[in-house]
Amino acid sequence: MGGHRAPLFTLDEKQQQTAFATDLEALVERYQHEFDMTFASMAGVLYCFATRTVMDAYMARVAETVLEDYELVEEDDEYEDEDDEDEGEEWKSADNSE
């Protein structure tokens, strides 16, 4: 998937939806005439593409949120380095008590 490009001209959301639907309709008609694809096959491909598009958008939002959270933690220095030299030594005292 390519990056976002600046539009050649400005369309409102409704005009963009109409242009996309018109182009998609023409593409579907072309494939119906040029290929031996069933309607179910085309619908399946479109469904998979739509699902992948939604998941890509969702994962991009999740990644953005995680990065924002990570940046906030680093900026706040919420987690400072502690002296952990004796960390993990608890088991030694438990073994010696027997």
Image (spheres, grey):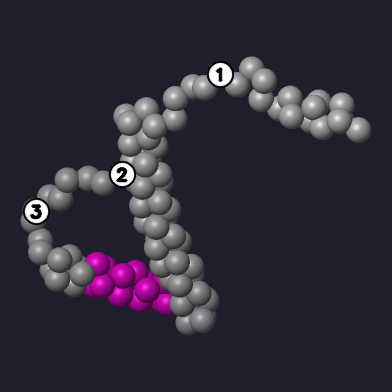
Q: Position of residue 43 (x, y in %)?
A: 46, 77
Q: In the image as oriented, which residue stretches furthest toward the right?
A: 98
* Residue 81, above or below 95: above
Q: Which residue is mark 1?
A: 83
The amino acid on which the numbered mark 2 sits, given as a three-letter code, is Gly
Residue 71 at least partly seen: no
- 43 sits left or right of 91 in the view: left
Q: Amino acid at mark 3?
A: Phe
Number of the label disc, if any, that sits on residue 59: none
Label 1 is placed on what type of residue? Asp
* Distance Cα–Cα, label 3 vs label 1: 59 Å
Quarter assignment of residue 24:
bottom left
Secondary structure beneath disc 1?
A: loop
Magenta-colored segment: predominant secondary structure: helix
Identify the residue at image location x=26%, y=46%.
4
Quarter of the image that includes the C terminus:
top right
Does the rendering let one see residue 4? yes
> Does 18 appear in magenta?
no
Q: Which residue is mark 3?
A: 9
Badge 1 crowding class, 10 Å Cα cut-off, few under 14, some 14 to 19, many 20 or more, is few
* Residue ID for mark 2: 3
Give the extent of the magenta segment: 20-34
